Structures are given as structure tokens and as C-alpha cells.
Amino acid sequence: MVRFVVRRVLSAIPVLWIVITVTFVLMHAAPGGPWDALSVHKRLDPALQAAFNHRYGLDKPLYQQYFIYLNNVIHLNFGTSFSQQGTSTLSVIFTGFPYSAAIGLFGFIFAVIIGIPIGILAAVKQNTWADYSSLFIATIGYAVPNFVIGVFLLVVFGVKLGMGSILWHGHWENYILPSIVLGLGPAAYLARLSRATMLDEIQHDYVRTARAKGLRFTSIVFLHVVRNAIIPVVTIMGPAIASLVTGTIIIEEVFNVPGMGHLYITSINARDYPVIMGTTLLYAVFIIVGNMLVDITYGLIDPRIKSS
Amino acid sequence: MAVTPSTNTESRDAIASGDVLRPKQRSLWTDAWRRLRRNRAATAGAIYIIFVCIIAALAPVVAPDNPNNASPTAQTFTPPFWVAGHDSHYLLGTDELARDELSRLIYGARVSLAVGVIPTAIITLIGSLVGLVAGWAGGVVDNLLMRLVDAVYAFPAFLFFIVLATVLRDTTFGHLLGGLVMLFTAFAIVGWTDMARLVRSQVLSVKQRDYIEASRAIGSPTWRIVIKHILPNSLAPIIVAIAFAVPTYILAEASLSFLGLGVQASVPSWGGMVIDSFPAILSRSEFVLMPSILIASVMLAFTFLGDGLRDALDPRMTR
């Protein structure tokens, strides 16, 4: 187990290196520079621009900047923001992080506690109206883009019902809609998948044996079937976490949340190189760790898989 | 199973021609086709998709107005026909720049379909090729290709789209076909890995079958085995994957456009229309809702069709 975890952590390093390299190259290839935003109204004095460039090492050849950045990242030094002078990249990112983390976490909880029970219910009540309607709703939730659902809810609650309070004020109730919208897609996906795996599992002979022994159907389902059926469901939680993490970028734009996704878009538009790199890396780490946790739980749930 | 009139006539014809004793030929494809037609949601999805394709193809004929230039007399935000104060000339009203909403929605269908179909075609080609080579060759080639797939797969796709779109938007390349070429490229770079994995695993399982060995024993060249046996027998899961890939890219375009990073502003796209009218959501929510509904409906149609295809082509469904 320890060896498995260590190997997975090590295998993340080349991926992170690729993420850094690709982002670095693309970012510097983008037209415009970090000081354009400062000079919206008048052109920035060339001498001042040169001074800025020198201060942040942007006057060095690109390959040198690249190796300096790599070296800094190894020492966990992510530099300081260009657009918010003197503030470290990490503290810029962490002003937005709590909002995104809260929405992502609530979204995930919503997805799990809504999606999986609906899938199990639909499978147990196969071919009844409960099955059809939950499958239909799940298909809609899975197919309709989350920003479209977000826009719908904004129109319904904000415009038709006149609830101005759903617009972002930083209160707890502002987290409800973004979390639900974010969690809806993964919830629908989990529901569809857990229904399918439950149906597969429920046909097995051990279920018939347990019924023949006179066990109650509900206890068979919850003691045996769910435990076996949940394994494929757990495997897709990795991609689900990835879609939650990057999904917040869109959701934050819809609901005007000042989170990490919002910061990411602003930093890209401002060519704030350190913040772009820092945020991309953090997103990549989340996605990788998410996938890794899934692999580890996979081994824990199913003893047949010795995390090989 | 209910006996429908058509099977009745069929069986009568069969008796008449003396074919009763010979069982009717049933291949995977005729079975799948029958199952697909019986699936109402999938049929409805397919019909809707064909309808949207026709509208998109005939856009210059069907669209009542120019999607990009407002007529000088037009006013901004004329409401659609179900809202008081509408103008009968503009069935669905005019947008924030006084352009005809209906025409823009019709032309927007072109962007959404192109962005769904073309990258899917590219990734199917690249992915099938890589998967075939990896699965057939095995060994070092397989190992190298699969490590490449792993690396691309681990890369956060949506972040890549955002950064790439930012970089290329203002370059000549980014302007090709109003930014569509850039989107196709971005989607293709990241998207081929799933298809490659799928095709590889199919090749690996098909390659073990006896008929492949038989074919090799009679001296068929590799290309013949691949084209005649491996590809046709791997086709079913590829078709299902294609049906699910298309809506993924439609969604990615809409999401990027929603962030202002999609096609150029001169190209009407549904995602772009959502974000363009988004600032007016409180007063003119219809203009946010109309393109949103279209995005949702096309994605839903593709999902229903994909679900139907999967159920129809999955041999385990035959009981």
C-alpha cells in the first residue's frame, strides 16, 4: 500500500512538469504582456516598463526564465503577483480559494448524497415510474451544461421570483445555488452509473441465494449488493472531482463569485504570469490528487484489488 | 412481444415463398437497428439532430435576416413574439446590437454542429490510428504510445483550452474561420486519448479470436486483416464513443464562448449569445434563455441518441 502511494505520488511529478512547461510556453506565446493592463489609459513609460521587466526577470532569455521558474517551484516559491504588486502569488490565490473550495465541497457532497441513492432506488424499483422519472431527470442533469442550469436558476429565482439576495453578497445562502448547479452534473452521472452497476450486480447468484435463505430484500441490497456495485461508481469519482474543480470556473462567472476560477480568468487576461502558473498548478494538483484518492479507495473497498 | 401487422405480413410472405425453415439472417447491425428504432428517446433525438442539421445547412435560405448586420431601422432588444411590444418583422426579437435573434440562432446552429462534429471526426481518426498501432504492434510501441496517452490524459483539458484560446485568439491562426480552426485544434490535441484507449482495448480482444488466426494462416496481409476483421469488429463501441464525443465538444465550445474565449465575436454562436446578453439578464432574460435552451436541447438529443446506440449495440442486451 505504501509503495503504491509513493509510486503514484512520484508518477505525478512528470505530469506536473508537463503542465508547467506547456502553460509556460503558451502563456509567454500569448500576445501582450503583464504591463499592458497598467497602461490602459496612457502608454507605460518605456523606461518604467524596462525597470518592471528587470525587476521580475522578464528581460532574461525565455529559457533562463523557464529554468529559474522550475527551480523556484521546486523550492515552493511561486513568486509575487504582477497585477497586485508586492502580494505573493499564494496569498492572491488564497483570497479566492475558500469560496471555490466551499462551492466545490458542497457540490461534491450534493452529488454523492443525491446521485447514488437515486441510482440505487431506480435500480431496486426497475421499470417503475420511479425508475423512469429518475433516469430521465438524471439524463437531463447530465446532458444540460451547468452554466445553462445556472442561468435558468438565476432567471427563476433572481428575475421571476425577485430574490435579489441570490446575487453574490458573500452570505451563506449565496453558496446554495452555485453548489447545487455544480453538483448536478456529477450527481446525474453518479445516478446513471450506480443504477447500471446495481442492475448488473442484482442478477448475481448470491442475491438469489440470500433471498432463498429468507433474508429481507432491503438488507440484501444494503449489506451485499451496494457494497459490490459501488466499486465502478468510485472509479468515476476521479473524473467527477476534475469536473467539479474546473467546473467552478464557469459557475463563478455565472454567479459572480470572487473565487479561484474568477481569479484564473482575470490573471489570464492581465497576463499575470505567476498567478496563471500558480493557479494552473494548483488545479492540476487537485485533479491528480483526486484521481489518486480514488485509486486508493478502490483498493480499500475491493480487497481483490491489491492496489497492483 | 406484441405482434405487429408488419411481422404478420412478413411471416405470410415467408410461408408463401417456402422460406419458413431457413431462419431469417440476423446480424449485429440489423438487430441493433431494430433496437434503436424501438427506443423512442433515441429516435426523437436522432430526428431532432437531423432537423437541426438541415436548418444549419440551409441557414442562408431559412434565416430571415443577416445575422451580423442590424438593419438601420431596427431597435435593440425588441422582445420576442410572446412578450408585449414585439415587432412582427422580428419573430424572436432583436439582440443587444439590434440584430435579428432568430437569424443568429439559425447561424449559431452551424457553429455548434461544426464544433461538435469536426473535432470528433479528427479524434476518431487519430485515436483509431494510435489505438490500432498500439494494440496490433504491442511491445515497446504499445508502451510508448500508452505513456503518451497517459500524459495527455492527465493534463487538465479545460485549463488547456482556456490558455490556448487566450494565446491564439488574436493571431492569424486564431482568426481562421472565425476562430473555429483554433477550437478544432485545441479539442483534437487533448481529445484523441479516450478513443485511442478504446480502440486499443478492442484490438487487443479481437486479435485473440480464432478467425484472425485463420485469416493469418491463409496468408492474408496485415492491412487486410485490420481493415476486414479488426475494424468492423471494433466498430460498435467506437460508434457509441462518437455519439458521446459530439456533445462534449458542443459543451466545451459553449463554455469557452461563455468565458469570452470561444469563436470570434463576428461569428454567431449559442454560447457567445448567452454571454453577450448575460449583462441584461435581469431585464431581458429571454435573450439569455433562447440560446441556452438550444444548447441544452441539442446536447440532450445527442445524449439520448448515444444512450440508445449503446443499448442497441451492446450484445449483452440481447436476452
Image (cartoon, helix red, strand yellow):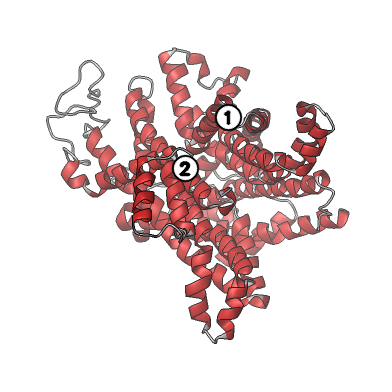
CA–CA distance between discs 1 and 2?
18 Å
What kind of residue is marked 1? Asp
Q: Give the farthest residue toward the top.
A: A162
What kind of residue is marked 2? Thr
Q: Nearer the viewer, residue A71 or B194?
A: B194
Q: Nearer the viewer, residue A181 or B228?
A: B228
Above or below, comparing residue A199 to residue A171 in the picture: below
Residue at which label 1 appears:
A131
The residue under the point 19% across, 40% down is: B63
Above or below, comparing residue B164 to residue B141 in the picture: above
Give coordinates of residue B82: x percent, y percent: 25, 20
The residue under the point 38% across, 57% down is: B118
Above or below, comparing residue B276 to residue B114 in the picture: above
Give coordinates of residue A109: x percent, y percent: 68, 30
Quarter holding residue B205: bottom right
Give coordinates of residue B181: x percent, y percent: 37, 58
The label shown at residue B303 is: 2
Q: Is residue A248 left or right of residue A101?
A: left
- Chain of the residue where label 2 is placed in the rendered structure: B
Give coordinates of residue A37: x percent, y percent: 45, 43
Dot 1 alpha-carbon crowd within 10 angstroms: few under 14, some 14 to 19, many 20 or more: some
Pointer 1 and pointer 2 on the same chain: no
Q: Could you tell me if residue B165 is visible in this image?
A: no
Q: Nearer the viewer, residue A13 or A308?
A: A308
